[in-house]
Image (cartoon, rainbow, N blue to C red):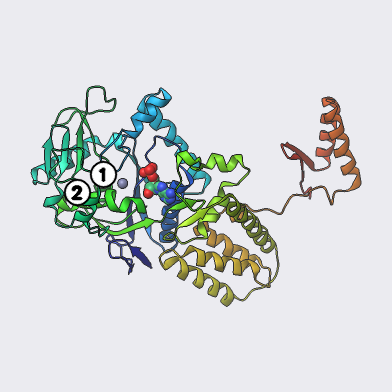
Amino acid sequence: MKLYNTLSRQKENFRPIHGNEVRIYSCGPTVYNYAHIGNLRTYIFMDILRRVLKYNGYKLKHVMNITDVGHLVSDADEGEDKMIKSAKEQQKSPWEIAEFYTKKFFEDIAALNIETPEIIAKATEHIPEMIEFVEALVEKGYGYETSDGIYFDIGKFEGYGKLSRLDLEGQIAGARVSVNEEKRHPADFALWKKAPREHIMQWPSPWGMGYPGWHIECSAMGRKYLGDQFDIHTGGVDHIPIHHENEIAQSEALLGKPAVNYWMHGEFLLVDNGKMSKSLGNTYTIDDLKARGFNPLSFRYFCLNAHYRSKLNFTWDALKAAQVSLERLYEGAVAHKTAEGKVEPEVIEKFKKEFTEAISDDLNVPKALGVTWSVIRYGIKSKALYDLLVDMDRILGLDIHKAEKKEDDGQELDPEIKELVEKRQQARKEKNWKLADEIRDRLKEMGIFLEDTPQGVKIIKKRTD
Ligand code: AMP
Ligand code: ZN
């Protein structure tokens, strides 16, 4: 299979280091707030990568970190600590904040059928590994101490900027003057920060009480679980110029060789063609989608329609269209489920081949989804095609196997039942709960189950044979 490597700006043939096992590191969430749908798009991309690798027979060892130590408001070591800011605002401890949003994050990704990586690594549980990493860098001459921390000396690392291909001098000339006069170069970044007494999260270190820089977190935890060199590192495109550039600098300075073979980045989700921002009130969450009556999986479907390296623009109308398509996809799958038509094995093979080729070409899921639709629309309805759709859903993750025939909406109910349902509605209106319950029980005996929902009564007909 082929994967696009940000480092080479090319699609490359994928070859793992450790035989059949693929080792992956994904930058995880900073848990000081709810994940927004942009963040979640990046984790859907991560999930698709996992699923495609598994579909192609690989085993996975995949680490995702949870940044539960606050990193600073800007990626470049300036501003307030996000976690502590959120804790202050909510009058909770940073640990409580982290615990709350971590739990929420896992609920959100579960709602989107995003698989949880094999290893979840919390930053606060890996402080000794980070200190050790920083010590080694200092020893090798790549780290230096200032009055407020230990910094990485990018002037000593030759390859700095190779991932983003940035013109460092140009970038710095245009940037604000560094607030830290003690830094040797404005782009030098913190490996470790010395904590003022009032800083809530702090740990003992050879440099006194303090807390780790954000970038060292990923380098240290990746190395601990995946070894000095591993296969794939993922994140959103915003991580290319600072976070991942800094990770490369730290790890390569320590090892003298690259730690990661393939760097992969998911493009941004835009909202109404612009950046999501708190001030515009458009940083939507999964709960916002649910509150508007959307199935979270329609957001997943919406994301599958675009390649992970393309920008994707979110609007409520586009989400509505995705939800309608997903419903049609379910209906189409169900039409094959119990059908008795016969389809030649060659037809199935051809579909499967096209699908596998698409996903193996740098995760071309939009194309693969097109193949799925061809299966659904195939002239002959057949259980064999249903099984193929369920197999494709190992990649799509849309719960095709759960799709059922639509429940009766009352149209085809026989008149006796219809009358009873209406009678019960009337009884409920008159608050005659006893009668309403009696009717409900009678219907139950007839195999008709009622469910009262905010949209009205739902009638579920169970087969009695
Ligand atoms: P954070 O919790 O801020 O570290 O972000 C979590 C992940 O979401 C990172 O991989 C970011 O690159 C990614 N991300 C942030 N904003 C967006 C967006 N608008 N669209 C897609 N991914 C995003
Ligand atoms: Zn990271």
Residue ID at (82%, 26%) = 433
> Whole-percent x and y of residue 131?
18, 37
- Identify the image quadrant of residue 6: bottom left
Q: Residues within 10 Å of mark 2 (few under 14, many from 20)?
A: many
Residue ID at (38%, 32%) = 98
Question: Considering only vertical position in the picture, is 216 above or below 378?
Answer: above
In the image, 285 versus 280, the foreground residue is 280
Instruction: Name the residue beneath numbered marker 1.
Output: 215
Residues under numbered marks 2 and 1 in contact, where contact means CB atoms less than 8 Å apart? yes
Label 2 SS: helix
Label 1 SS: helix
- Disc 2 versus disc 1: distance between alpha carbons? 8 Å
The disc placed on residue 250 is: 2
* Disc 1 residue lies near ligand 2 with CB under 8 A: yes
Type of amino acid under label 2: Gln
> Whole-percent x and y of residue 14?
33, 66
Q: Is residue 137 left or right of residue 63?
A: left
